[in-house]
Amino acid sequence: MHRSRILLAAAALGVIAAATLHLACSAGPRPPNVLLISIDMLRADHVSAYGYTRPTTPAIDRLAQEGTLFEEHISSSSWTLPAHAALFTSLPDGIHGATDTDKALGPAATTLAERFQSAGYETVGFFAGPYLHPAFGFGQGFDRYENCTSYAKELDSEPSAQWSMDPKVMRESHADVTNPTVLARFVSWFQGRSERPFFAFVHLWDAHFDFVPPPPWDQRFDPEYKGTVDGKGFFFDERINPTMPARDLEHLIALYDGEIGWTDQHVGQICALLASRGLLDDTVVLVTSDHGTEFFEHGRKGHRQTLYDEVVHVPCVLRYPKAVPAHARVKQTTRSIDVGPTLLALAGLEAPADVIGESLLPLLKPGNSVRPPRAVCELDSVGIHLRAVRTSKWKFVDRVDAGDPLWFDLATDPKELTPLSDLQSELGKRASQAYLEEVGVLDAWIDRHPPTHVTSAVPGGVRHQLKGYGYVGGDENPVEPPKKD
């Protein structure tokens, strides 16, 4: 063995020993385990506990009944990569910088996994979608970070989106079925885990299109449908468009709900496993999502195009009987960047000093007078540049390149169907002033801290190919390449 490798190994053992000693010497009871479940592309308004009429999520509903549900939880973005980067770093997109496929979290960024790892936790992650590949920086701090996709395994050692943005692989990823693999990998790890408390990140992808749930979920919510829409090729299927027959759209949404129900079943199985070992009540469980999706509410399908609530309003349910009240609902606006500080606080750990997210625990106290933060959402990808600030009463959207901001009165227009541009009205002035204040906070933070993101190693040939395919908008998919004559 080379001397450098010996030194590295010794250093690693020293870190592990120090972290283990930290846990062993800490006063008080054993710290809780922490389980963070992210269900990709899950709209809050399709979760039963949030008032959806279909019984899509009995397992999540049970967690909500036994814990606390955050009614207005807002993601940092409307697509997977930056939203998870914000979740992991407790920083808005404009600060963590991993906003497009040519960017990744840099080693200077402190991730949630790194914080738990430094405290002596065993840290494991299981991801099932292309934009959570470690080449985008998401493996930082995990003792074990497993690729649960069924495609492009041979390219795991490649530096980045050589596979995550390839048109063929994008099709394969959207058609991929990963829930069973994620569950099996989690169970395998769980059965052989160490004696240390654990931080586990579980990414469940299958609610993301394509919408092809297995039986009986494929007919659970629309068994009478006789049409031809089958949920396959969602982005490329030209029949799925704003003028499609209402009955076909109803079925498409039913298939999405079927995927949600099937994914929720896996959440229930994970929780049942913890309960069977007597660990559920000793584990902080938080279930959330990175973004939602559009079904033509504003003329579009998919996501990564806008910052409407159907793509940024996501569920957040927290269960930990020892510190989190049951049957509780928090009405104030909360943010995805608040998840990390909350989980750390419940584990008795401090969040890094240089984050913007805040613990949600003060909101759990009855009669609290905590002023809720404004949620900042951003989209800086595929040629689209948007920034929004949202409260429970209004949303202000800055179309950065266009220079013509607009805003919505959410009290009278919760579906955001009537954009307003009058900045002289009382609410317009308040919204625009608040937006400028939030931008000032972000700018001041950036002035005090150097950028933490790095360039992801997307091969230049792939970028050129994608430009040739017209990858300038839409979703996490390039436009279909032109067929050769």
Image (cartoon, grey):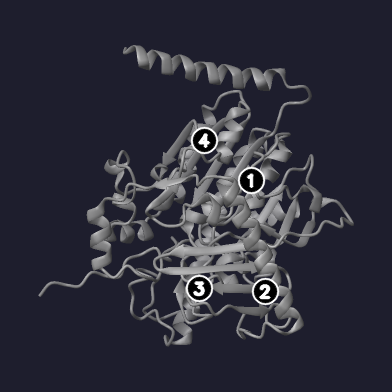
Q: Position of residue 229 (x, y in %)?
A: 38, 77
The residue pinned by badge 2 equals 432
Instruction: Mark 2 or mark 1: name the one nearer the start of the chain.
Output: 1
Count residues near mark 4 (Cα–Cα under 10 Å), then give few for <14, some for 14-19, many for 20+.
many
- Is 315 above or below relative to 297? above
Q: Secondary structure at mark 4?
A: strand
CB under 8 Å between discs 3 and 2:
no
Disc marking residue 294: 3
Q: Quadrant of residue 430?
A: bottom right
CB under 8 Å between discs 2 and 1:
no
The residue pinned by badge 4 equals 124
Q: Quadrant of residue 396?
A: bottom right
Q: Position of residue 155 (x, y in %)?
A: 28, 43
Disc marking residue 355: 1
Disc marking residue 293: none
Mark 4 vs mark 2: give the one in front. 2
